[in-house]
Image (cartoon, grey):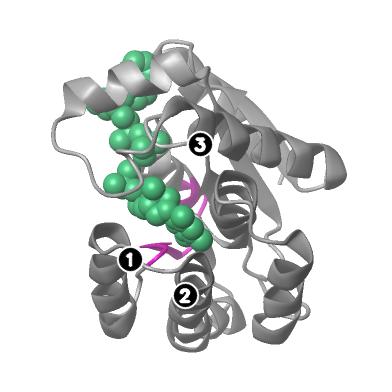
Amino acid sequence: MNSGKFITFEGIDGAGKSSHIGFVADLLAARGHTVVTTREPGGTALGEQLREVLLHQKMHLETEALLMFASRREHLAQVIEPALARGDWVISDRFTDATFAYQGGGRHLSIDKLGQLETWVHPHLQPDLTLLFDVPLEVARARLDSAGSHDKFEREQADFFADVRAEYRRRATQFPARFRIIDSTKPMDEVRNALEVILSSI
Ligand SMILES: Nc1ncnc2c1ncn2[C@@H]1O[C@H](COP(=O)(O)OP(=O)(O)O)[C@@H](O)[C@H]1O
Ligand SMILES: Cc1cn([C@H]2C[C@H](O)[C@@H](COP(=O)(O)OP(=O)(O)O)O2)c(=O)[nH]c1=O
């Protein structure tokens, strides 16, 4: 039987990752795969309610991390695990690397504590491929500012995003088998070419 794969999209806000999800989904569908496209926080009815709270309310950083993992637990149970069990391919706009990068890197929550939550919520599952859309902070900021209104995370300052980006890049080095870094400063068509090359090998 055709076995499904789990692909995650990551990067700092404004890096340009969401712009390519439809493209990658179409590419995989053209190869005959059934593709499920989803996102975090969110991806389920409850998860989308948690997303509203997470993106717009201030809270203790541990509450924030716990709610990210609560949304993820529901997402895994309702969407990701059943889809992979059917043999579908799953594309998620963010997953656990985002919690390490934002709550760990950005907000300095202990990486050990986050590791414990990860072990609790998904002890075995990891993405087969993580696409890290990487841009300097100024490029991301300019893209965000031209895109309109900002949520709680998008209003954070440059040093926060510097720490988020550094943690993403550290994880890419720690898990080289699944991470691919995309230079997202390049024009859209060049980014797409790079994605095609990466996807042709999985
Ligand atoms: N390679 C690119 N070159 C120029 N602009 C881009 C590129 N990728 C994305 N953008 C623009 O940057 C903005 C943010 O992109 P988006 O995909 O929503 O970012 P993210 O999901 O990473 O926050 C959008 O207005 C998008 O059109
Ligand atoms: C999944 C996840 C997202 N986030 C943050 C990153 C983003 O700022 C925000 C929502 O992500 P995203 O959907 O990428 O935002 P948008 O579509 O508005 O660009 O949530 C965390 O802080 N931790 C997490 O675990």
Magenta-colored stretch includes residue 179: no
The region drawn magenta spans 28-41
Label 3 lies in ligand 2 vicinity (Cβ under 8 Å): no
User: Horizontally, is 59 left or right of 104 in the view?
Assistant: left
User: Horizontally, is 74 left or right of 81 in the view?
Assistant: left
Label 1 lies in ligand 2 vicinity (Cβ under 8 Å): yes
Label 1: few (<14), some or many (≥20) within 10 Å?
many
> Is 33 drawn above or below residue 1 in the view shown?
above
Where does label 1 land, which residue?
Answer: 54
> Is 200 drawn above or below residue 116 in the view shown?
above
Where does label 2 land, which residue?
Answer: 63
Label 2: few (<14), some or many (≥20) within 10 Å?
few
Residue visible at 71% across and 57% down in the picture: 128
Using the image as rendered, state which of residue 180 and residue 54 is in the foreground: 54
Q: Which image quarter: residue 6?
A: bottom right
Q: Secondary structure at mark 3?
A: helix
